[in-house]
């Protein structure tokens, strides 16, 4: 079960990364917090492209670095935590993207982030009885 979920997560990360780079760049810009582009020398599109590359690399690492899967999983969980403020900013500032066009939809989306953190963590850990 862990292996299947890890592979599904890897495929999802590669897909998400590519979507950042190609067909969903504008939608992802809605999740870039204003403070990020105000304080750093990068625009929204640059943040989206950089995060897309990182996401695709995480997906590839989950597949290609099996000996490092626990470390990759921990880093991916941390990444999901790090991007959460962007989801909150999208909700607070009422930015529509990805069909999240109401306050209720944007708020509901926030509750999926902890599930992603848990998924990245759990699917990359060794089962206790395997140690």
Image: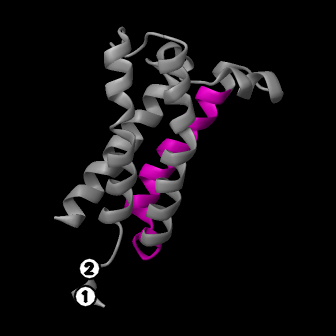
Q: In the rendered structure, which segment of residues is drawn in magenta?
A: 47-69
Mark identifier at residue 31 = none
Residue occupying image coordinates x 49% and y 29%: 87
Image position of 61 with respect to 25: above or below? below
Q: Is residue 5 left or right of residue 103?
A: left
Residue occupying image coordinates x 32% and y 18%: 105
Image position of 51 with respect to 35: above or below? below
Residue occupying image coordinates x 46% and y 59%: 61
| Residue 66 lies in the magenta-colored region | yes
Give the total number of marks visible in the rendering. 2
How packed mark 1 is, by other alpha carbons closer than 10 Å (few <14, some 14-19, many 20 or more), is: few
Please tell me whether mark 2 sits on a helix, a strand or a loop: loop
Residue 107 locus on image (x, y percent): 37, 24
How packed mark 2 is, by other alpha carbons closer than 10 Å (few <14, some 14-19, many 20 or more), is: few
Which of the colour schemes (rainbow, by chain, secondary structure, one colour) is used?
one colour
Image quadrant in which the C terminus is located: bottom left
Residue 29 locus on image (x, y percent): 56, 18
Image quadrant in which the N terminus is located: bottom left
Residue occupying image coordinates x 32% and y 55%: 119
Residue 82 locus on image (x, y percent): 57, 44
Inter-mark Cα distance, 1 to 2: 5 Å
Image position of 11 with respect to 28: above or below? below
- Where residue 39 sits, quadrant-wise, is top right
| Residue 57 lies in the magenta-colored region | yes
Mark identifier at residue 127 = 2
Depth check, front residue: 131 or 17: 131
| Disc 1 to disc 2: CB gap under 8 Å | yes
Can you identify the residue that label 1 sits on? 130
Please tell me whether mark 1 sits on a helix, a strand or a loop: helix
Q: Magenta-highlighted stretch: main secondary structure?
A: helix
Residue 71 locus on image (x, y percent): 50, 69
Depth check, front residue: 117 or 64: 117
């Amino acid at each position: 079960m862990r292996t299947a979920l890890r592979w599904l997560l890897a495929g999802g990360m590669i897909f998400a990364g590519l979507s950042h780079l190609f067909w969903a760049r504008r939608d992802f810009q809605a999740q870039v917090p204003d403070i990020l582009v105000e304080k750093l020398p990068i625009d929204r599109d640059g943040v989206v492209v950089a995060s897309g590359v990182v996401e695709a690399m995480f997906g590839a690492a989950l597949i290609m670095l099996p000996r490092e899967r626990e470390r990759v999983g921990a880093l991916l969980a941390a990444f999901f935590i790090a991007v959460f403020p962007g989801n909150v900013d999208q909700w607070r500032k009422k930015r529509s993207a990805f069909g999240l066009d109401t306050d209720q939809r944007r708020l509901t989306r926030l509750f999926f982030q902890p599930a992603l953190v848990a998924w990245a963590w759990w699917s990359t850990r060794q089962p206790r009885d395997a140690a």
